[in-house]
Image (cartoon, helix red, strand yellow):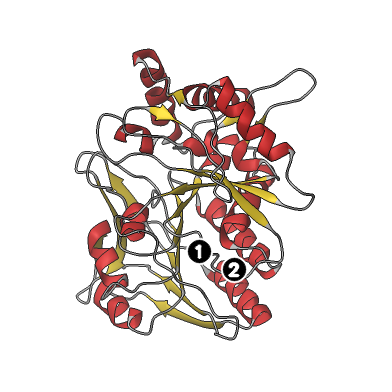
Amino acid sequence: MESNGRVRARRLSNKDPSPRGQVRYDKLDADLIGLFERWLTLRDRDWRDDEIRIFGSLLHRCLFNDEIWFWIQAQIDSRDDGTRIRLELTFPADLPYSRLAAIPWEYLYRPDQPGKNGVFLAADPGLILSRYIPLEDGEQEKDFAPEQQLQVLVVVSRPDDRHLEPVEYEDVVATIEDTCQKLGFSFSVMHNPTVEELRREAWQRPHLVHFMGHGQFDPGRGQGSLAFSQRAGGTDWVSDRRLAEALTQEGTGPRAVVLHSCEGGRADFTASFAGVAPQLVRSGVQCVVAMQYAVTNETAISFSTSLYERLADGLDLDTAVQESRSRVRRESTPPDPRLLGIPVVYLQNRTPLLPSPLASETVAEGK
């Protein structure tokens, strides 16, 4: 999307552009989307599939007119067998359309067509849906040499705080360790670090950091934060910017961060890219995977376990997220269609985290 509200797509390989459109976002659309967003924050609300499809169809209509979507669909239909189309959504940071960047586009639903059922874009096996945040200095080239051993750091944060629920981490840590052994990665775990201890560990330049713990987002302050331990006991709620400073020192940070916490993916783009995931990306992290709404321990465990199993199968990180979204939604008990759109991928660089045997091509930036 452009700052004037126009929408276009283009294929990155040859710069082939789509027709231009205009975002449809009048007051009624804004009110309806805002209503659904408030409902989505309610973890205990029961959702029906048709309710999520209605919301996703509304998002699709707001973002894509017929001409643009037909162009994108043509790219999808013409792809080679076994390949996927990377659909990257890019939104302006300046007013008046910065509000749109925080909408949960992971619920986008292509409506039913004659002879063809609709599909959630985040569950489409031919797509990889992510958000792209361009940096002022352009993409940072961070190619990973095949002979280099990838370093994985797991951070388990369980402050001594009776107000916080227990963090169930054993199964996920075991799955990550198994994946690292299978792929030949280095693996280490930090338990209950302070943010300063994490800062010192970050000097070792881990390539992937997986945080397990509690997160929150304050819409009034436009700020996300994660719960860390304090030396004297209790909880240190570390703000998004403070965390980004701890992990990205001298302009160098992890290639990827996975936030196994509630609301790590929520954002407020009217407040200077507020939110843990956007701040990490803006500070130089190539890829951030996060949850944009509160989830149960069971859901977070299921998603993270699936994510690393798919990485062990040779998929790249954003592809593994696409498949894990579908798995979590499919295997939830009772079925919860809300789960599909909770995991979000933020990118600032298109260089894969890991070499992948499955080919894919970026088609649209959603600009």
Q: In the rendered image of this protein, does residue 294 appear above or below residue 62?
A: below
Residue at the location (41% across, 19% down)? 32
**Circle 2/circle 1 CB separation < 8 Å:** yes
Quadrant, the C terminus? top left
Residue 261, percent from left and from top: 43, 56
Which residue corresponds to mark 2? 171
SS assignment at label 2: helix
Residue 262, percent from left and from top: 41, 51
Residue at the location (30% across, 71% down)? 248
Amino acid beneath label 2: Asp
Q: In the rendered image of this protein, does residue 259 appear above or below residue 99?
A: below
Q: In the rendered image of this protein, does residue 145 appear above or below residue 280?
A: below
Q: In the image, 50: left or right of 246?
A: right
Residue 195 in which image quadrant = bottom left
Checking the image for residue 168, the label placed there is 1
Residue 79, percent from left and from top: 73, 45
Residue at the location (34% across, 60% down)? 280
